[in-house]
Each structure stands twice: as structure tokens, then as C-alpha cells.
Amino acid sequence: MSPPRRYPFSAIVAQEEMKQALVSVAVDPGIGGVLVFGERGTGKSTAVRALAQLLPKIERVKDCLYNCAPDRPAGLCPRCAEGSAAETEACTVPVVDLPLGASEDRVVGSLDLEAALNRGEKVFEPGLLARANRGFLYIDEVNLLDDHLVDLLIDVAASGENLVEREGLSIRHPARFVLVGSGNPEEGELRPQLLDRFGMSVDVGTPDEIDDRVEVVMRRDAFERDPAAFVKQYQRKESKLRDQIVAAREALEDIETGREVLEAAAALCRSLKTDGLRGEITLMKAARAQAALAGESKVTLDDLKRVAPSVLRHRLRRSPLDDASSSVRVERAMEELFDAA
Amino acid sequence: MPPDSGIGPEDDPALVAALIAVAPQALGGVVLKGGPGPERDAWLSTLSRLTDGRALARVPFDIGDDRLIGGLDLAATMAAGRAVLDRGLLAGADGGIVVVAMAERWTTAAMQRICAAIDTGCVRVEREGLSETLPASFGVVALDEGIEDDEFVPPTLTDRLAFTLYVTAFDPVDPDAPGFAPEDVAAARARLDRIGFGREAYARLCETALALGIPSLRAPQLAAVAARAHAALYGRERVTAEDLEAACRLCLLPRATQLPAPPEQTEQPPEEPPPKEAPEDLPSDNDTQNEDRSEPPEAPETERPDDAPADDDRSDSTPSPPDEDAMIEAAVAALPEGLLGLLEKRAGGRRAMRKADRGKAGIRAETRAQGRARGARAGDPKSGARLDVSATLRAAAPWQRIRREACRVAGDSPRPVVRVEDFRVRRYEQRTTTTIVFLVDASGSQAVNRLAEAKGAVESLLADCYVRRDRVALITFRRQSADLVLPPTRSLVAAKKRLSRMPGGGGTPMALGLDAGLELAQSLEKRGDHAQLVVITDGRANVTRAGEGNPERATEEAFNAARAIAESRLDVLLIDASPRPRPAARELASALNADYLPLPYAAAAGVSRAVRNTLASAA
């Protein structure tokens, strides 16, 4: 059966900041995960799935549960490593949903009990992290997830490997994915240490303008009524965006980062008093991705300004005396630093 | 024949059933509120009758993934000689309706499986070496039997279902009574795609949703589908005001979180599009990209599919879409009575966490492996329960012959074959401890006898608790402080010792005492115990938290503290220990939201009996 049609990424109305953040991490997964804060029904999971659909398909060993890349012998899962030249297939970039209340062994993988009981063999049954390899892991309501699970996920996302030591197993398998968490900030907060480890964060809300709202509803309805026709309508824009991302990925390494941009980033982080150096590092990576997408060969201050709010807004130490929201603080700091110069 | 357009809200259940039958997957489905009974059964059978007589697929609570999503079909594998997939319940319901029983008890996580299928229209089955995507496009009927405030269907599902229905007065006797017949439904289905629906109609729905305080944009979109289905059912070519009103009533009103502001009287009706545009308003949907808007630059110029249906006949004089205010008024007029109360409750702020989601995964896993063992049950050890190996092997034993056959046919060497459905996990019985916290007014305003009686009551209750394995704690307040005289304990000896040494006399620092009681109860609840509060006092406060003797301020503080306790939803009993029942204690009891028990000169045994009875009925 042909895979289900997904709502096209370029057909999403408004939500520019969220789209920009997602495209950035598609260009450079090293930026880290993306946190999307907003109420229900604001198109968060639609956007992630749409992006995965947009990206070029990946080649994987047929039916491999770890989505192994056939041309990377170093990163193969145990099963593929021993197999001979197996068939490959092209498949869409995987998006795995992490259900709320998932148990750790479902996420990480566990002992295959049937094999153990039947054949007395210790066989590892891969979990969700394996399936998300080379794709996206989408966590809805990340602020309600158990802390130890979030810790685990962030560690795996950072190292790119899942190390399983349990029930007599000792397995290591590749788990490179982009973590996307969404949630309603009114229902709970993530601890600052966890917040800091997400690369970018965005706030989304349903559009205020009534015209935008009508547009969203109309497009959604048109898509539901005739998905094929709707997708066809946006095919050209989707291809354009896809080519842009692919080109940006290739150009990423060669982007120059001038010293004045580095200094500006450091100055910004210092004035906002962000803890640690992760803010600056992520800021640079995100700015480079922006430059790559724009087809530039050098990172400019404009690139930096464009990504700064989403990179920094969740890393600020909240001061009880300051009523302004985090986004406003970032913008204020940017104004003081850059527009005065 | 569909009945006359004079159908009223009391015929809504039949109307909703027909609408769902017309477009189950596009509408998502319905949340059916109310307990089990003949009305609900009658409604469900009506729905089944209208969807070509197909049986509704029931999804039992706590269904495993294998049954829901699919897995290996043993019998077919044996017959065919290769691995054959069992489609699972959701794929099996493709094109039909799924009934989710006890929807308010499902955890959000479990519900997400169904929501994913609703979103994508398919399910993905993955086992070793087997990975298939099966079409699964269905409508959902979620049965909501929740009563408490924290028992409700996960919002992640309700957001995707168009309707909410209270089935109270569905006539079970005559199935054709407000009838729509299956032929009407089938005709409507055929007509559905051609129904005209223009931008103005979308705008009206969005505005109404906004006025009703509905943040989600799924709501107006589902309402649009409902309006079209409604038009199709009544044999219309285009959506009319009536269809839009029905959609508002059925889809938007139940989700309202605020009452719309009343329409201003002096407003002219300028929202009516000028007459020359009227025919353009409700053309076929493929035209929407070409309407004049200043907005998004993304209108693709060339990409109109060539096989778009021809524009609807524009020579019809169509009624212009309804005035926004008129629609809101009509919607408000149709507000059922209970809704106002509901709205007030909802507007009051954040929704409580659902009871079904409350236990974190960690705690639940622990209780599955602790407590007294009580046999085995079928279950998946992955969920944290402990595998009972001998019971599992015993369950697998009878199937060995068949399974070895299957293995042989599939080319595997025959071995004892254990499957997931054979797994048996240990069952444990875990009971939460109940701790009764006594909060005793040991001040001078209580005669010494009161104190003695309080002590006696606690002692006799201790004896009871020893049997029931409950615990007792004792906090007294007098002079300028509240003291935890007896920390939660089951030990009779320690309790008696502390009690005998309990002093009395001094002023009444009521607020301090109530604070201490609340603190202890909350720390117990956090640990998973069940705490109940028994306050023994005459209700007359005269010492403030700061320690000064000021009866007015002390009373005010006491009432604040009482309100905090009331908000925490603890079970509280107030025993009035004044010689004659006085209003002070009664008022305090109502501030505490507590049961009130007057006991002038009561004997200790009487107190303990009364406490037991009242708390038992509150539990």
C-alpha cells in the first residue's frame, strides 16, 4: 500500500519561527533538539511529520529495524553487520512518536522474551530509539515525561548511540535522531538543566488574525477532502524547499564564520547571562545553518539575529523581578548590542 | 426521506448518528456521555444500522498492542505455509466505526495509538522481519462514563472528534422514530464531495469558534465537514445557514469555554458580502485559491489539477451566508441548560490532571511488583510486571502440537513454542494505607472532659485501626502552637504513652492547628497514603498565627486556613465538642467543606463509632 499522504510542509500557514527552526535542524542535526511550546491543535506534530516527508528519502537495508545505512559499515547494527549485501530500499525519513507513559524498556529496547524462552538465546528486541535512527523522535507533552526518560533521551541524542545494559544484555547501536518535544507550558515546566540541552525552542499559538485562521481551516479541509490534489498543488514549493535543504547541507562545512560574529554571539550571551557555553555554540551552529540556507558563503550578523531568539529564549535564568517574557528580553539585549553599534 | 427541516435539538442524537454514518472518518466521531443503559445501546444500534448494518468494532479497555495494531496470525500461517499477518482490530475496522469503551479511563499514551491511526488513516505493524502498513480509516465513538472532575476522555482524542453527545432521551422503542434511513445516508455519501462550500462559510465558522473561546483550529474544520454532511443529508447542493447553525450547535458549542459577547445593537450588517459577489461565495472548493486575498504569497499559479469538477452552476440565487451575530445568537439560544455551569467550571482555569494519567510510570511499575502475590494473569511483562514462568509454560503447553505443525510448515525446526499471548504475569495486591489525622483543640475553652474524651476516642480507634492496618496520628493545638503529639503510627503502645502525657489549657491557635493538619495530610498523600482529617474543637479561635490574642483576626485566619484545606479536597470531619452546639463550629465545618458532627457530652465510644461511620461513608 502506498504510504499515507502527509500534509505538505510548505502549505503550513504562518508559524514562520517554528518552520525556520525545524528546517535549521534538518540542515544541521548537531544543533540539538527543538522544543515547541503551544496549545493543542496548533499544528506541531503536523509540522514535524510534514518535514520528514519533505526531506529526501534515505537508503536503508530492507526491513532493518535500525534503519541501517548500507554504505556505512561502521555504523551497522549487529544484524546487518553479519548479513551479506542485503537488499536496500528507499524510505521516508522516520518520525517516531514517543507515547506519554512509555516504559523504559519500550524506549530503549529489551530482551526478546520469546526467543529467550524458546531457544534460550539472548536476543535484543530493539525499541523506539532504534526505529528513530536517522530520523526524528517526536515527544508530545515533553514537560510531563518522567525526568529520567528525558535525561536518557537527551544523552542518546547527544552521543548518537544507544547503550543498553540490562537483563544480561550489553548492546550498543546507532541512534542518531533529532529530538522534537512539544508541550503546553501551562501544564508543567522542564527543569533548567534539561531545557538547556535542547537546541532551539519556539512558541506557537494559533494565529491571531482571523484571515490566517480561516486560511488554516480551509487548507486543512481541502487536504482532507482530496489529499492527492492538494499535495500536487504544493509539489513545486516542496521540491524547491527540499533542494534548498540539500544544498545547504552540502554547503554547511564551507561556511566561514568571521570573528566579529563570534564576538557578537559571545557578547549577547554574556549580556543575557546564559549559563555555560552551550548557548554560544548552538547560536553559531544555528547561524551557520541559516547562512547555508540563504546560499551565503559567510555568516552575517543578520543570520545571528534571526536565530538568536529561538536559541536563547529557553536558556535565560528567570529573574522574578523582570516581568518581561524571555523572547522580549532576548530582543531587548539584541537591540542594545547591535543597533547601538 | 429525511424529516422536515423543522428538526429540533431533541432530535440531535439521531442526527449525529446519521452524520457520522455519512462520513465517519472525515468527522472523526463522537464522544458519547452518560452511563450504560438502553438509550446508549439503542443509539449504538441505530448507528450500526445506518452504516450498512456493519457491526461496530468494540475496543476493550486495556487492549494489548497485538490485538489493536496487529501481529502474526497463527492459524493462517499454518494453512499458508508462510508468515501471515493478523490485521488487528483497527485495520479490521477500516471503513467502519470503532467504539472505545471506558474512554475516560484510558491513559493518554494508550489513546495515542488510536489518534495516530485517525491522523494518518493507517496502522503500521512491525515485528521481526515483518513490517507492513495497513489502511485503517474509521470513525470513533468514545464512551465516556466519567463522573468526577478529573475523569474525562483524553483531550488528544476529543479534539479529533467532531461531536459530543449526551444521550439521555433517545427513544429506544421505535428505531425509525426521528428517522433517517440507510438509503438517505448512502445518498448523502454519494453527494458529499460535490457540496458547495465557500470562504465565507469557513470564515463564519472560524469567527463563531473564536467567539466561543475555542482555541483549537480543528474545531472549525470539523464543523465545516459536519455542515457539508448535513447539507448532503438534506439533499442540498450547497451549504445553507441552517447547515452552519447545526454544525455550530453540534460541534462548536460543546467545546465552548466562554459565552460570546452579546452582539452590539447599533452595529450595521456590513459583513454581508455585496450581492454581486454572492454567487462566488459558495463555489466548489477548488476555486478557493483564486479568490482575491491580499494574504499569503503562496497561491500556486499553475497547479490546479485538471480534473477539478466544473464550477457549480452560478446562476442559482443562493442565500447569502448568515450574519455572524445571528449565528452566534442561534447557537447561544440552543445552549443546553447544564452547559452554563460547565462553562463556568471550565473558565475557572487549568484543568486538573486526569485521574487515569496521574500515577507516574515509575510508581505504577512498583506496585505491579509489590504487595501480596495473588496468582497469575495474562499480561505483557514489558509493562513492568514480573513474568511467572511456570504459569506461562503451562499456558503454552496445550498449543504445542499445533504450533509445531506451523513451525514445520514454515520451515523452522520444531521446538516448544511460546507466544506473547501465553505470557502470564504475577498479580499482586496492593492496598494504600489510610491514615487518620486527629486534630484536637487542647485549649482551655475545652473543658478537661473534652480532652479526656478525645483521648479515649483516639484510643478506641487505634484498636480498630490495628485490625484494619490503618494508621493514626495526633496533632494538638493550644496556647501559641500546634504540636505533632503522635506521628503516624500503628503502634498501640507508643500511642497510649504519648496520649497520657498530652497537656491542656491556654488559648486556641486555630489557624496554626489547621495548617499543621493540612501539612501532615499533604505529605502523607504525596507518599501515596490516603489521609483523612478529624478535627475536634468547639470552633472558637482566639489566638492568631503570630501568637497574639485577637479573636477577630484569629477567626479570619482560621477561615483562610480552612479554605486551603477545602481546596485540597481532603476528607474532613469536624466534631463539635462544645457543650451545646454553637454556630462557630458549624461555620468552620462548612468552610472546611467537612462533615459536621455535634457531640455534646458524648462518650468516647460514641465518638469513635461516629467517626468510623462518617469517614467510611466519605471514603
Image (cartoon, rainbow, N blue to C red):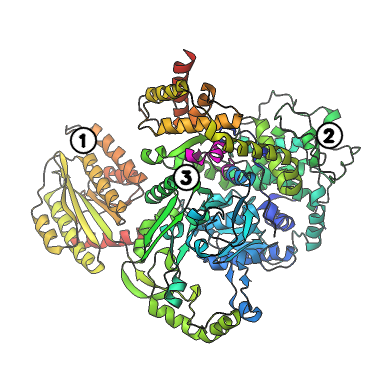
Q: Is residue B390 left or right of residue B418?
A: left
Please give the name of the residue rendered at 38% of the width and 72% of the height, measured from the top-left corner.
B426
Tell me the amino acid under the disc marked 1.
Answer: Arg
Q: CA distance from mark 2 to mark 1?
A: 72 Å
Residue B432: x and y, percent?
A: 31, 62
Precedes in sequence: disc 3 or disc 2: 2
Q: Residues within 10 Å of mark 1 (few under 14, many from 20)?
A: some
On screen, residue A309 above or below A246: above
Q: CA distance from mark 3 to mark 2?
A: 43 Å
Foreground of the two, B538 or A78: A78
Precedes in sequence: disc 2 or disc 1: 2
**Outermost right residue:** B315
Q: Can you tell which mark lies on residue B280?
A: 2
Which residue in the structure is indicated by mark 1? B545
Q: Residues within 10 Å of mark 3 (few under 14, many from 20)?
A: few
Q: Is residue B159 left or right of residue B311?
A: left
Tell me the amino acid under the disc marked 3.
Answer: Arg
Q: Can you tell which mark lies on residue B467?
A: none
Please report the bounds of the magenta region as a residue range. A21-46
Foreground of the two, A242 or A50: A242
Which residue in the structure is indicated by mark 3? B351
Q: Label 3: chain?
A: B
